[in-house]
């Protein structure tokens, strides 16, 4: 680019970072996270297979939600917001996936006491968060989650030439 064109582009890019609608970014980001998390949960419970790459889609949808909600603005604050919302979405979705399958396992048991525990599956997970973390944490899982978080931050990354 020639110098005047480069200056014009950088000026328009800097305008993308001014006065973002933070409440809109949070609201639409949460909505996008809810939809993305629900879709991921539905895919996992219907296929009985957890596609880790869905974390990339979750990150992209949340980042896009924050971008649209902010009035199509970008910036470091919005990147942080996207990453935090994506991480929350991934964790909450994983919680519900593990709770769903734990409940199914407990209901399949023949012991009446174990079957009675099935109704408390989500509370059991909250009481024993270490069990949930063991179900979530794996090297490839962490890598995919990390890529999903990166994707969410790229959508709202400030641009410059």
Image (cartoon, rainbow, N blue to C red):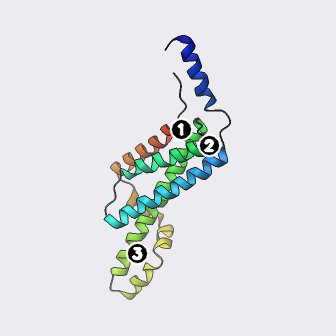
Task: Label 1, secondary structure: give it.
Answer: loop
Residue 7 in picture, x, y percent from top left: 58, 17
Disc 1 or 2, which lies upstream in sequence?
A: 2
- Measure the alpha-carbon separation of dots 3 and 1: 38 Å
144 lies left or right of 80: left
Q: Which residue is mark 3?
A: 103
Task: Label 2, secondary structure: give it.
Answer: loop
Q: Local crowd at mark 2 within 10 Å, few (<14), some, or many (≥20)?
A: many
Circle on res. 156 = 1
Between 45 and 106, the one lying in front of the other is: 45
- Measure the alpha-carbon separation of dots 2 and 3: 39 Å
Q: Residue at x 58, y 51 (%)?
A: 28
Residue 36 in picture, x, y percent from top left: 47, 55
The answer to whether marks 1 and 2 mark residues whose Cβ atoms lie closer than 8 Å is: yes
The answer to whether marks 3 and 1 mark residues whose Cβ atoms lie closer than 8 Å is: no
Instruction: Count how many numbered circles sit on residues in the image.
Output: 3
Relative to residue 131, is residue 6 depicted above or below?
A: above
Q: Which residue is mark 2?
A: 70
Does residue 12 appear in the picture of this structure? yes
In the picture as drawn, the residue positioned furthest to the top comes out as 3
Q: Quadrant of residue 5?
A: top right
Relative to residue 128, is residue 71 depicted above or below?
A: above
Q: Local crowd at mark 1 within 10 Å, few (<14), some, or many (≥20)?
A: many
Disc 2 or 3, which lies upstream in sequence?
A: 2
Q: Residue at x 32, y 86 (%)?
A: 110
Does residue 133 appear in the picture of this structure? no
Between 148 and 134, the one lying in front of the other is: 148
Q: Residue at x 33, y 82 (%)?
A: 109
Q: Residue at x 54, y 17 (%)?
A: 6
Residue 14 in picture, x, y percent from top left: 61, 27
């Amino acid at each position: 680019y020639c110098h005047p064109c480069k200056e014009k582009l950088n000026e328009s890019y800097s305008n993308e970072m001014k006065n973002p609608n933070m409440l809109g970014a949070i609201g639409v980001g949460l909505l996008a996270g809810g939809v993305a998390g629900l879709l991921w949960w539905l895919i996992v419970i219907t296929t009985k297979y957890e596609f880790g790459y869905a974390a990339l889609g979750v990150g992209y949808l949340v980042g896009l939600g924050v971008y649209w909600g902010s009035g199509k603005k970008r910036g470091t604050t919005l990147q942080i917001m996207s990453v935090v919302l994506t991480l929350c979405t991934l964790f909450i979705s994983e919680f519900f996936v593990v709770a769903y399958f734990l409940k199914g396992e407990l209901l399949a048991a023949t012991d009446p006491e174990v079957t009675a525990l099935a109704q408390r599956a989500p509370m059991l997970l909250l009481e024993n968060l270490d069990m949930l973390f063991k179900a979530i944490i794996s090297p490839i899982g962490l890598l995919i989650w990390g890529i999903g978080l990166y994707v969410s931050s790229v959508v709202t990354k400030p641009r410059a030439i």
